[in-house]
Amino acid sequence: TTLRLVNLTTKTIEATTKTIEASSASISEAGSQSTISHAVEQFLSTPLQDIALADVPAVGPKTLRALERHNIKTAEQLFGYFLYQERHEDAVRGFLRDDMGLHGATVKRLYDSMITKADRLCEMGGRGYGSSSAGTLSHQPSSTMSTSTAHEYFMSTPLQDIALDQVPGVGDKTLPKLRQASISSAEALFGYFLYVGRDEENFRDWLKADSIGVRGAEAKKVHDAMRDKADVLCALGGR
């Protein structure tokens, strides 16, 4: 009888231990999910210029080192690369996987975070109103507008609604060269500007390269438009 009681007691203890372990695992998983959700919400609601690269969801110490080896040192640059690739999932995930050496859940979380951030930012107008102040110009190239009107339209229109030929400084000769350089939208051009860290010299050197050939006053217009748009968009929080 004593032996049976000992066996029953042992089984009861084992069952209780398993229940506690299962409960602890559930609590730990719930806590982990809560932490992830908080990190994502912080990323989405914080102005891009105020986000450290280490605070981007899924960027841990290993990922941080991999990104920095490829000269991506800010959240703005990583976001810029995403736009530069036209939000194409295969291209972005391929870059993270093949060039960065990242895999699985890390790649998915990074991509998902970037696309949600892009959806929020790129639908906002330049002043954060989410609508253009120059709606009647929605199909008009910048080359047909005055300098001030082209700049006003570019600044007040959501980035996702701006055609490439509506970027100040992009005219009939520039447009096909940018497309040959795999830039087919204002978003992609803006993304490249962020990707090079908003650096004027690097950006204008890229514009001046033989493959594009944008120089002088036109290059300055393109750069200034990108700079001014970045000053506004990257200071906006999520909604």
Image (cartoon, rainbow, N blue to C red):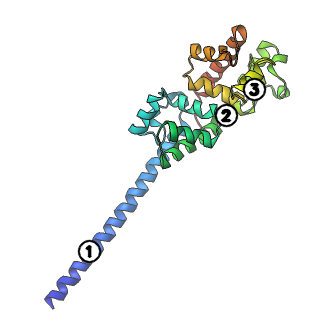
Tag 1 residue: 14
| Amino acid at pointer 3 | Leu
Q: Are marks 3 and 2 in contact (CB under 8 Å)?
A: no
Residue 207 location in percent, x, y?
A: 66, 17
Question: Circle 2 is placed at which residue position?
Answer: 122
N-terminal-most mark, 1 or 2: 1
Can residue 104 be seen here? The reply is yes
- The tag on residue 164 is 3
Name the residue rendered at 70%, 8% in the picture. Answer: 216
Is 192 left, or right, of 50 in this rendering? right
Q: Secondary structure at mark 1?
A: helix
On the image, which quarter does residue 17 sit in?
bottom left
Q: Are marks 1 and 2 in contact (CB under 8 Å)?
A: no
The answer for how far apart the CA atoms under marks 1 and 2 are is: 56 Å
Label whose residue precedes the other's in the sequence (3 or 2): 2
Point 77% across, 22% down: residue: 175
- Residue 149 is situated, as x and y percent measured from the top left of the image, at 79, 17
From what the image shows, is residue 197 above or below residue 58?
Answer: above
Q: Is residue 166 visible?
A: no
Q: Position of residue 181 (x, y in %)?
A: 69, 25
Residue type, mark 1 in image: Glu
